[in-house]
Image (cartoon, rainbow, N blue to C red):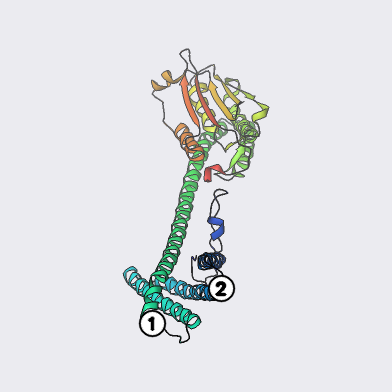
Amino acid sequence: MAIHSPVATSSASLPASDPLSVRPFFENKARAFWTLQAAGWSGYLVLRSVVGISNGFSLEKIIPVIIEAILGYCITLLLSTLYGYYRRIPRIMGVFLTLATLAAATFLYAALNAFSFSFITTTQPGVTVTLLIGNLFITFVVLAGWSALYFAINYYLIVESQIDEMRALELQASSAQLAMLRYQLNPHFLFNTLNSISTLVLLKQTERANAMLSRLSAFLRYTLANEPTAHVTVAQEVETLKLYLEIEKMRFEDRLRPSFEIDPRAERARLPSLLLQPLVENAIKYAVTPQEEGAEIRVDVRLVGQRVRIAVSDTGPGLHEIRHSSSVSTGVGLSNIRERLAQAYGPDHRFESRSAPAGGFSVEIEIPFQLENVNREAA
């Protein structure tokens, strides 16, 4: 019947998680208090009136019930103010004062009910021991029930508030981790690219160095325009990959042979930005670089039901040869992608890598098909 002191006017920002959630009702605590208070005591009045007139209607039966409901309404307003104060003081003292106040309110409520009943039903109004004892039980049950409901609802709101705070802290930690994972990619890529530009300058190939710098500038403008935890469409991710491959094409020329097979239906699907760049970078490092003839790198995106299946494969020596290479580096690529997928989709994703017996390495990712422009990584 009540949730807070009626003088409280602040509202809690509690998002509704489903249509049956009670949280929107408590967004404005003052409004919720008055609504519950009015509905509770109105229901009490109706119930007591029905019981009182079950054997016949008369004013002698209705008026005491109306007075009883009005008195209860007023006393519980006072209780809500006192309880609100008790909740801010040390717990042991607050519990003691709450019980003492409940006992005093019960006695006062019973005495007022007994007096009002005697005033209407007898010629000599007064509070007798019999009437007082007869009213103590019902008043205690009503006020104790109201008090229990008051503290239960407020406890629920405190728990929900703490849950919201924990979710906000988890969201901040998750966003920070995702930003860190995303920013790991830029120094890794920049080191390789700037090293190539430096080599071209040393070889006095200034035109190629200028061209690579221009493409690097375009790539960085494109990638830095997105938030580190943002999602982009498959089409945008493919354009980013093409910008990246144009830069690498300056280094490897015909040894790097990329191809794309993109299902038009999957182009609008969303995925974490720069998710595929480490896969292509790994393919260049372990498939193109060690082979004189280079390798093909294939990016395939298909829509399978309500899932987006992404495959990045190469025609390099494969995982077996990579493991036996003295230049193998664990890097941040695959582990970075696994962590970002886990953050973005939880268990609702698939990440598999395999090496073919005849050579070649492939990674396959499967994620939900989503069109909404939402930041799932930060959710």
Q: Is 59 in front, or is 158?
A: 59
323 to the left or right of 21: left
238 to the left or right of 198: right
Instruction: Return the x and y of residue 17 as percentages of the image width and height.
Output: 54, 49
- Label 1 environment density (alpha carbons within 10 Å; few <14, some 14–19, many ≥20): few
Mark 2 vs 1: CB contact within 8 A: no
Residue bearing mark 2: 58
Query: Which badge, 2 or 1, comes first in the chain's sequence?
Result: 2
The circle drawn on residue 68 is none
**How far apart are the two marked residues, 2 and 1, measured between alpha carbons?**
24 Å
Q: Quadrant of residue 126?
A: bottom left
Q: Which residue type carries mark 1?
A: Thr
Farthest-out residue, bottom: 124
Instruction: Return the x and y of residue 288 as percentages of the image width and height.
Output: 52, 22
Farthest-out residue, front: 55
Instruction: Return the x and y of residue 49 as percentages of the image width and height.
Output: 53, 68
Query: Looking at the image, which residue is at 56% across and 73% down?
Result: 58
- SS at mark 2 in the image: loop
Farthest-out residue, right: 264
Q: Is 323 in front, or is 112?
A: 112
- Label 2 environment density (alpha carbons within 10 Å; few <14, some 14–19, many ≥20): few
- SS at mark 1 in the image: loop
Query: Looking at the image, which residue is at 49% across and 29% down?
Result: 350
Frontmost of labels 2 and 1 is 2
The circle drawn on residue 128 is 1
Query: Looking at the image, which residue is at 43% across and 76% down?
Result: 109
Q: Is 349 in front, or is 158?
A: 158
Would you place residue 48 above or below residue 120 in this image? above
Instruction: Return the x and y of residue 226 as percentages of the image width and height.
Output: 60, 44
